[in-house]
Image: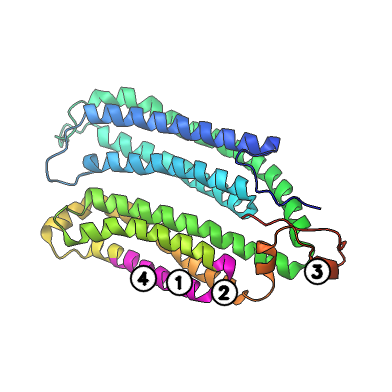
Amino acid sequence: MYSSRPSPIIPETIYGRLTLFCGIVEAAVIIILESIIAYFFGKSTNPTEGVVSPVRGIPVYLTVFSLAQVFSVILCWDALYHKNTIQIIGWVLFNFATFAYSIFQYNQMIGLFEFDPLNPNPEITDPDALKSIRPALVVIPIILGVFQLVDLVLAWKLYQEFGWRIYKKIGADPRMKNMYRWYQIFLMLLKFDFFFAVGFTIQFLALILQKNDPEFAITVAAIPIAAIITAMAVYGVRREDRRILAVFMLGLVTLLAYFIFKIWRTYNAQDPEREKRYQSTRKYLTFFGALSIFVVAMTLVVGTICWMNFGRGLQQILLSSGRPSTANAANGAPRAEQRKPIDV
């Protein structure tokens, strides 16, 4: 018989605690190093007022990268709290993406400080500052790479732990396990939707839009609205409420159109002033926007699959609270066995 008490805030198992500890340490060290880079970069540069140049964009990219570390910790803790095997895998993949970006960040920063006597960059006031920045730029990919290897080992251990727990709750019915897996994937994608939407919005607000731009207030308001809609989607899929999920899916289609329009606009700006702003940010906005489009499209597909699974028995398992499971009994499990709510 299983207790109906919720999962503890701090993981109970040694592998769970090690994973959370490693995630927090990794994020803290990277954020400190990014702050050091930002400090020396700010002292050695003087961005031209009113011009969106690579130098002006660097602090924004450092901020988004630091926010990615915070998001990684939240993603890790949430996966451990809800024992979501799919999200653990997503967390490892997300950390690999940050590792890859850290290598790109190194090349980006080195390229800015390279002195060209024929075409010096007037915004770089102290090229020697690279000596202070380079060690942090080198160490960040090394730290992320080492932790990535550790994360892979811990993720495998957690996959085994959580897999056994899910087996005890879901049973051996492959149809039910498949529906539950899609449910986990959907919840994980919701978190990525929110992160990429916020990251894309931050870059647009800081580098492209002006405060007197009509889009500015709308873009700012989009963040809390996105958070509310995401929470509604979690409730809707858990309760199998087709109306709520339909509203969410319509919102996803709108978001998809928004990202496509924004990327198209970066290459087809009508205003010459805005075209200047896009020149140095175009590839970063395209990269982030493309990832956002991919994640949103995946959420639409997986959300549709979850919709099709409504009414097939998964809701009773998700919302059960220590009651005997007749479904498992029918599959050969002991009738005395009871379920506790499944947190994902």
Kind of residue indicated by mark 4:
Thr
Residue corresponding to mark 4: 254
What's the image's color scheme? rainbow
Where does label 2 land, which residue? 307
Q: Which residue lies under the disc numbered 1? A: 249
* Horizontal arrangement in the rendering, residue 19 relative to residue 111 (left or right): right
**First of labels 3, 2 by sequence position:** 2
Residue 277 or 8: which is nearer the viewer?
Answer: 8
Label 3, label 1: how many angstroms apart (C-alpha)? 33 Å
Q: What residue is disc 3 on? A: 326
Quadrant location of the C terminus in the rendered image: bottom right
Calculate the distance from the C-alpha at mark 3 to the C-alpha at mark 2.
24 Å
Badge 4 or badge 3: first in the primary sequence = 4
**Do the numbered discs 4 and 2 sit on residues whose CB atoms are within 8 Å?**
no
Q: Amino acid at mark 2?
A: Trp
Give me the C-alpha separation between circle 4 and circle 1.
Answer: 9 Å
Query: Marks 1 and 2, Cα distance to the nearest angstrom?
Result: 10 Å
